[in-house]
Amino acid sequence: MLNQNKEKVELKKELVVLNKERQRLTKELSALRLIISEINSTLDLDRVLDLIIQKAIQVVEAERGSLMLFDHKTEELYVKSSIGLSKKTVSAVRIKPGEGIAGWVFKEGKPLLIKEGAKDIRFKKFDEIKEELKSIISVPLKIRDQVIGVINVDNKRKGDFFNKDDLLLLSTFANQAAIAIQNARLHQQMKNLAITDGLTGLYNFRYLKGRLEEEVKRAQRYKRPLALIMADIDCFKKYNDTFGHLEGNRVLKSLAHILKVNVREIDIVGRYGGEEFIIILPEANQEEAREIAERIRLKVEKYKFVNNKDQSDEKKLTLSLGVTSCFQEDISPQNLIYKVDQALYQAKGKGRNRVEVI
């Protein structure tokens, strides 16, 4: 009888502990749902990434954290968003798959909980990180079994170590966070498709039209300079007829690259149609625009357009460009287009491969 009473007491104690644990887990999962709901409330990719690392730290009460994504070009993990890391650290940290703790998690696709991170053989020390690293959790961000990045948090607040519950909670969070990242990426891709030319990757006519209207209004309202360049490939029809449309498309892509790398960061480059391109130059006067146009003309004139069928067969192409501006001039976007088109027409009429200004 005494043993039975003792067993009942022990069972009651266990039941109390289990109920408390259940209540804790219910509370945590409820909070997690609210956090995920907040992250999913936006489709802006940068905002999503910032929210994810903010909430990851909140979920497990960490002092510091970082969200790393995989760069397919360099084949490295880099810090995309962080809290508690300096700009110097963020720019310096680059990790190969399998390298360090984050690299191991990325390569293996498995989460890690390390109570004494700095002593772990997988730990990679960076000179930029001076603070002591204690407890660390690193979890993979997965989309359909493909790892796209890693969430890292370290140093539990109040001096505690992270535990298995923290690991489970952060892993569950990371699964939902990865979906949010994928949704934001798809949204960004759809936006890009709506405003860019499918062949060259430059802005399309629809976007150029709307952006030119905005820039003209801004220039006239604040009495600021605004210039426009229109460019056209000389004798492009003949090139297409001779070498075929696939080669012609390759030329258009190469030209798009030349245009993008030879303008200022604030300039807007787009494909106007066919082999015609437009560059909107905010805060540029007519002379500045002419200099940019001339630089582009020379780059194209010297560029080696190699025929893919015969790598030794170099093709030379040239560009005619028209330039105009609307500094302190009451002019509509349509009339600005007309003026720059007339300038281009003059360049063609005067022998091509030249810049004309109106």
Image (cartoon, helix red, strand yellow):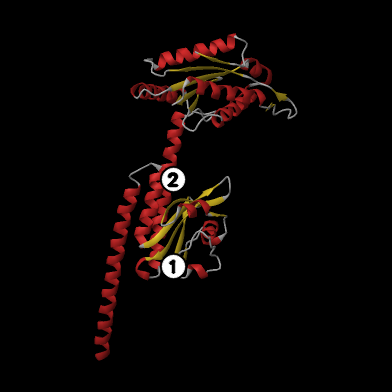
Q: Earlier in the sequence, mark 1 or mark 2?
A: 1
Asked whether the residues under the numbered discs 1 and 2 touch, taking CB atoms below 8 Å apart as contact, a structural biologist would say no
Task: Give the structural element (helix, strand or loop) at label 2.
Answer: helix
Q: As rendered, which of 85 and 254 lies closer to the eye?
A: 85
Callout 2: 10 Å neighbours few (<14), some, many (20+)?
Answer: some
In this view, 129 is above or below 1: above
Q: Amino acid at mark 2?
A: Gln
**Mark 2 highlights which residue?**
182
Rounded to the nearest angstrom, the CA distance separating label 1 from label 2 is 29 Å
What quarter of the picture does the N terminus occupy?
Answer: bottom left
Task: List the single residue furthest toward the right.
Answer: 312
Residue depicted at 54% across the width and 11% down the height: 345
Residue depicted at 42% across the width and 55% down the height: 174
In this view, 228 is above or below 202: above
Which is in the foreground here, disc 1 or disc 2?
1
Residue 125 pos. (x, y %) = 53, 63
Residue 43 pos. (x, y %) = 37, 42
**Mark 1 highlights which residue?**
135
Task: List the single residue furthest toward the top.
Answer: 349
Q: Is residue 277 visible?
A: no
Residue 195 pos. (x, y %) = 44, 29
Residue depicted at 31% across the width and 64% down the height: 25
Q: Amino acid at mark 1?
A: Ser
Residue 98 pos. (x, y %) = 57, 59
Residue depicted at 52% across the width and 70% down the height: 119
Q: Report the disc number at residue 171.
A: none
In this view, 70 is above or below 229: below
Q: Is 120 situated left or right of 301 in this image? A: left
Q: As rendered, which of 52 and 3 lies closer to the eye?
A: 52
Task: Give the structural element (helix, strand or loop) at label 1.
Answer: loop
